[in-house]
Amino acid sequence: MSTMDASLHLLDRQVIDVDGRLVGKVDDLELTEEDGALVVTGLLLGLGALLPRFGRRLGPWLNSRYAQISVSHAARRVPAVIDLDVVDRVESGVHLRVAREGLLRPRVQGIGGPVRHRLGALLDLPVRAASGQIEPGRRPRVLDVRLDHRPGESERCEVAALLVGAGRPGALLGYDRGRVGAPAPVAGLVAWLHRHSRLVDWGPGVEVDWERGEVTVTAAAETRPLRPTS
Protein backbone atom coordinates (compact mmCIF):
# COMPACT_ATOMS: atom_id res chain seq x y z
CA MET A 1 0.00 0.00 0.00
CA SER A 2 1.22 3.52 -0.74
CA THR A 3 0.27 4.84 2.70
CA MET A 4 -0.12 3.33 6.14
CA ASP A 5 -1.77 4.40 9.34
CA ALA A 6 0.79 3.80 12.07
CA SER A 7 -1.51 2.49 14.78
CA LEU A 8 -3.80 0.55 12.46
CA HIS A 9 -1.15 -1.15 10.32
CA LEU A 10 1.89 -1.48 12.58
CA LEU A 11 1.16 -1.42 16.31
CA ASP A 12 0.65 -4.84 17.93
CA ARG A 13 1.58 -6.70 14.72
CA GLN A 14 3.77 -9.79 14.98
CA VAL A 15 7.37 -9.38 13.83
CA ILE A 16 8.57 -12.35 11.75
CA ASP A 17 12.18 -12.97 10.70
CA VAL A 18 13.41 -14.13 7.29
CA ASP A 19 13.05 -17.78 8.33
CA GLY A 20 9.43 -17.36 9.40
CA ARG A 21 10.19 -17.38 13.14
CA LEU A 22 8.52 -15.01 15.57
CA VAL A 23 10.62 -12.21 17.02
CA GLY A 24 7.97 -10.43 19.11
CA LYS A 25 5.33 -7.80 18.43
CA VAL A 26 5.47 -4.11 17.63
CA ASP A 27 4.79 -2.34 20.93
CA ASP A 28 5.63 1.17 19.70
CA LEU A 29 7.43 3.03 16.91
CA GLU A 30 10.52 5.20 17.08
CA LEU A 31 10.08 8.59 15.36
CA THR A 32 13.19 10.65 14.57
CA GLU A 33 13.35 14.31 13.61
CA GLU A 34 15.14 14.74 10.27
CA ASP A 35 15.21 18.16 8.56
CA GLY A 36 11.70 19.08 9.70
CA ALA A 37 10.27 15.65 8.94
CA LEU A 38 9.31 13.01 11.48
CA VAL A 39 10.67 9.70 10.19
CA VAL A 40 9.92 6.18 11.41
CA THR A 41 13.36 4.76 12.18
CA GLY A 42 12.63 1.74 14.33
CA LEU A 43 10.21 -0.80 15.73
CA LEU A 44 10.17 -0.85 19.53
CA LEU A 45 9.52 -4.12 21.35
CA GLY A 46 9.08 -5.15 24.97
CA LEU A 47 7.30 -3.95 28.07
CA GLY A 48 9.52 -0.86 28.14
CA ALA A 49 7.76 0.18 24.92
CA LEU A 50 4.29 -1.13 25.69
CA LEU A 51 3.69 0.17 29.22
CA PRO A 52 4.12 3.91 28.45
CA ARG A 53 1.25 3.59 25.94
CA PHE A 54 -1.20 3.26 28.83
CA GLY A 55 -1.41 7.05 29.16
CA ARG A 56 0.62 10.00 30.38
CA ARG A 57 -0.15 9.18 34.03
CA LEU A 58 -0.68 5.43 34.24
CA GLY A 59 2.01 4.57 31.67
CA PRO A 60 5.01 6.07 33.53
CA TRP A 61 3.75 4.60 36.81
CA LEU A 62 3.51 1.11 35.31
CA ASN A 63 6.92 1.48 33.69
CA SER A 64 8.56 2.56 36.94
CA ARG A 65 6.99 -0.37 38.80
CA TYR A 66 8.21 -2.71 36.07
CA ALA A 67 11.75 -1.37 36.51
CA GLN A 68 11.57 -1.98 40.25
CA ILE A 69 10.92 -5.69 39.72
CA SER A 70 14.62 -6.12 39.05
CA VAL A 71 16.58 -3.03 40.02
CA SER A 72 19.86 -4.68 38.99
CA HIS A 73 18.80 -4.37 35.32
CA ALA A 74 19.67 -0.73 34.66
CA ALA A 75 18.17 -0.72 31.16
CA ARG A 76 14.99 -2.60 32.05
CA ARG A 77 12.78 0.33 31.03
CA VAL A 78 14.58 0.77 27.69
CA PRO A 79 12.78 -1.09 24.86
CA ALA A 80 14.53 -3.17 22.25
CA VAL A 81 14.68 -1.63 18.79
CA ILE A 82 14.68 -3.08 15.28
CA ASP A 83 15.94 -0.64 12.65
CA LEU A 84 13.56 -0.03 9.76
CA ASP A 85 16.19 -0.89 7.17
CA VAL A 86 15.78 -4.61 7.97
CA VAL A 87 12.01 -4.57 7.35
CA ASP A 88 11.11 -6.33 4.10
CA ARG A 89 7.33 -5.86 3.95
CA VAL A 90 4.25 -5.22 6.05
CA GLU A 91 1.31 -7.58 5.65
CA SER A 92 -0.71 -9.15 8.46
CA GLY A 93 2.66 -9.21 10.21
CA VAL A 94 5.90 -7.26 9.85
CA HIS A 95 8.35 -9.39 7.87
CA LEU A 96 12.11 -8.91 8.20
CA ARG A 97 14.87 -9.66 5.71
CA VAL A 98 17.25 -10.90 8.43
CA ALA A 99 17.33 -13.70 11.02
CA ARG A 100 16.35 -12.98 14.62
CA GLU A 101 19.61 -14.08 16.27
CA GLY A 102 21.19 -11.11 18.05
CA LEU A 103 18.66 -8.75 16.50
CA LEU A 104 17.06 -7.14 19.56
CA ARG A 105 19.09 -4.50 21.37
CA PRO A 106 18.43 -1.28 23.27
CA ARG A 107 18.84 2.03 21.47
CA VAL A 108 21.96 3.79 22.68
CA GLN A 109 21.21 7.52 22.77
CA GLY A 110 24.41 9.49 22.37
CA ILE A 111 24.92 13.08 23.44
CA GLY A 112 24.05 15.44 20.60
CA GLY A 113 22.42 12.65 18.63
CA PRO A 114 19.16 12.83 16.70
CA VAL A 115 15.98 13.81 18.53
CA ARG A 116 13.79 10.74 18.93
CA HIS A 117 10.18 10.37 20.04
CA ARG A 118 7.70 7.54 20.36
CA LEU A 119 4.49 7.17 18.42
CA GLY A 120 2.74 6.33 21.68
CA ALA A 121 3.62 9.80 22.98
CA LEU A 122 1.81 11.38 20.01
CA LEU A 123 -1.32 9.25 19.90
CA ASP A 124 -4.27 10.53 21.91
CA LEU A 125 -2.75 13.98 22.47
CA PRO A 126 -5.36 16.76 22.70
CA VAL A 127 -5.46 19.12 19.74
CA ARG A 128 -5.97 22.89 19.90
CA ALA A 129 -6.92 24.28 16.52
CA ALA A 130 -7.42 27.70 15.00
CA SER A 131 -11.01 28.61 14.17
CA GLY A 132 -12.26 26.76 11.10
CA GLN A 133 -9.37 24.30 10.92
CA ILE A 134 -11.22 21.46 12.62
CA GLU A 135 -14.99 21.02 12.65
CA PRO A 136 -16.61 21.56 16.05
CA GLY A 137 -16.54 18.36 18.04
CA ARG A 138 -15.89 17.11 21.50
CA ARG A 139 -12.26 17.26 22.56
CA PRO A 140 -10.41 16.53 19.29
CA ARG A 141 -7.40 14.26 19.75
CA VAL A 142 -4.78 12.52 17.61
CA LEU A 143 -6.48 9.25 16.58
CA ASP A 144 -3.73 7.95 14.30
CA VAL A 145 -0.76 9.05 12.23
CA ARG A 146 -0.70 8.60 8.46
CA LEU A 147 2.65 7.53 7.04
CA ASP A 148 4.03 7.91 3.52
CA HIS A 149 7.05 6.18 2.03
CA ARG A 150 10.02 8.48 1.61
CA PRO A 151 11.03 9.09 -2.03
CA GLY A 152 13.66 6.54 -3.06
CA GLU A 153 13.53 4.76 0.32
CA SER A 154 11.00 1.94 0.00
CA GLU A 155 11.32 0.71 3.58
CA ARG A 156 11.34 4.07 5.35
CA CYS A 157 8.26 6.11 6.12
CA GLU A 158 7.68 9.59 7.42
CA VAL A 159 4.69 11.23 9.06
CA ALA A 160 2.50 12.72 6.33
CA ALA A 161 -0.58 13.70 8.35
CA LEU A 162 -2.33 13.43 11.68
CA LEU A 163 -5.81 11.91 11.88
CA VAL A 164 -7.65 14.17 14.30
CA GLY A 165 -11.10 13.66 15.75
CA ALA A 166 -13.15 12.73 18.78
CA GLY A 167 -12.72 9.50 20.67
CA ARG A 168 -9.62 7.41 21.23
CA PRO A 169 -6.94 5.87 18.97
CA GLY A 170 -8.40 2.87 17.19
CA ALA A 171 -11.92 4.31 17.16
CA LEU A 172 -11.93 4.52 13.35
CA LEU A 173 -11.43 0.74 13.09
CA GLY A 174 -9.84 1.23 9.67
CA TYR A 175 -13.22 1.91 8.02
CA ASP A 176 -12.11 5.36 6.91
CA ARG A 177 -9.65 3.81 4.45
CA GLY A 178 -12.32 2.10 2.34
CA ARG A 179 -10.55 -1.29 2.33
CA VAL A 180 -12.16 -2.90 5.35
CA GLY A 181 -15.21 -5.05 4.74
CA ALA A 182 -17.83 -4.33 7.35
CA PRO A 183 -21.60 -4.57 7.82
CA ALA A 184 -23.13 -1.43 6.35
CA PRO A 185 -24.74 -0.35 9.65
CA VAL A 186 -21.38 -0.56 11.47
CA ALA A 187 -19.51 1.31 8.75
CA GLY A 188 -22.27 3.90 8.64
CA LEU A 189 -22.19 4.39 12.39
CA VAL A 190 -18.41 4.84 12.42
CA ALA A 191 -18.65 7.33 9.54
CA TRP A 192 -21.32 9.32 11.39
CA LEU A 193 -19.42 9.34 14.69
CA HIS A 194 -16.30 10.63 12.90
CA ARG A 195 -18.01 13.04 10.51
CA HIS A 196 -15.99 15.88 12.02
CA SER A 197 -12.63 14.07 11.85
CA ARG A 198 -9.91 15.66 9.74
CA LEU A 199 -6.58 14.89 8.16
CA VAL A 200 -4.03 17.52 9.19
CA ASP A 201 -0.97 17.55 6.93
CA TRP A 202 2.33 17.42 8.78
CA GLY A 203 4.30 20.59 8.18
CA PRO A 204 3.85 24.34 8.68
CA GLY A 205 1.10 25.11 11.13
CA VAL A 206 1.41 21.88 13.12
CA GLU A 207 3.27 22.19 16.40
CA VAL A 208 3.76 19.38 18.91
CA ASP A 209 4.64 20.27 22.49
CA TRP A 210 6.09 16.94 23.58
CA GLU A 211 6.67 18.09 27.15
CA ARG A 212 3.17 19.43 27.77
CA GLY A 213 1.52 16.76 25.66
CA GLU A 214 -0.44 18.93 23.24
CA VAL A 215 -0.76 19.54 19.50
CA THR A 216 -1.50 23.00 18.12
CA VAL A 217 -2.93 23.43 14.61
CA THR A 218 -2.65 27.01 13.39
CA ALA A 219 -4.28 28.75 10.45
CA ALA A 220 -1.21 27.90 8.33
CA ALA A 221 -1.89 24.15 8.49
CA GLU A 222 -3.41 22.24 5.58
CA THR A 223 -6.47 20.25 6.68
CA ARG A 224 -9.10 18.27 4.82
CA PRO A 225 -12.05 15.99 5.61
CA LEU A 226 -11.23 12.40 6.37
CA ARG A 227 -12.22 10.18 3.45
CA PRO A 228 -11.12 6.81 2.04
CA THR A 229 -7.66 6.77 0.47
CA SER A 230 -6.89 5.11 -2.86
Image: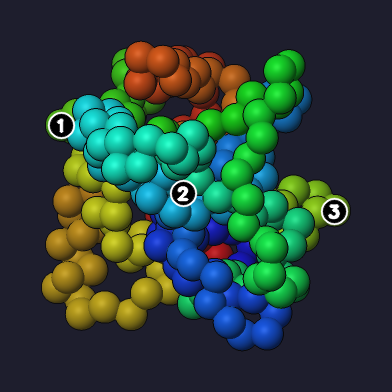
Q: Nearer the viewer, mark 3 or mark 2?
A: 2
Residue 29, horizontal then vertical, whole percent: 52, 47
Camera-side residue of 177 and 119: 119
Which residue in the rendered view is the most extreme toward the right?
A: 152
Relative placement, left or right, of 68 versus 207 is left
Earlier-in-chain disc, 3 versus 2: 2
136 vs 90: above or below: above
Quarter of the picture containing the C terminus is bottom right
Name the residue that disc number 1 marks: 138
Most foreground residue, 224 or 28: 28
Label number found at residue 152: 3
Asked if residue 41 is positioned above or below residue 205 in the image, the reply reads below
Q: Secondary structure at mark 2?
A: strand
Question: What's the CA distance linking mark 3 and mark 2?
Answer: 25 Å
In the orientation shown, which residue stands out farthest toward the bottom?
20
| Residue 202 location (% of width, % of height) | 56, 32
Q: Amino acid at mark 1?
A: Arg
Discs 1, 3 touching: Cβ within 8 Å: no
Please report the residue visible at 85 percent of the width from the left and 53 percent of the height from the top.
Answer: 152
Residue at 58% x, 82% y: name it.
21
Residue in the image at 20% along x and 43% along y: 167
Residue 31 seen in this snapshot: yes
Judge depth for marks 2 and 1 and give the one in front. Answer: 2
Q: Farthest front residue?
A: 72
Question: Looking at the image, is mark 1 or mark 3 nearer the viewer?
Answer: 3
Q: CA distance from mark 1 to mark 3?
A: 40 Å
Give the residue at x 66% y 71%: 100
Query: Would you say 228 lies left or right of 67 here?
Result: right
Residue 123 spot, x, y in % from top left: 37, 39
The location of residue 228, given as percent across then percent down, is 43, 61
Label 2 sits on residue: 28
Q: In front here: 164 or 89?
A: 89
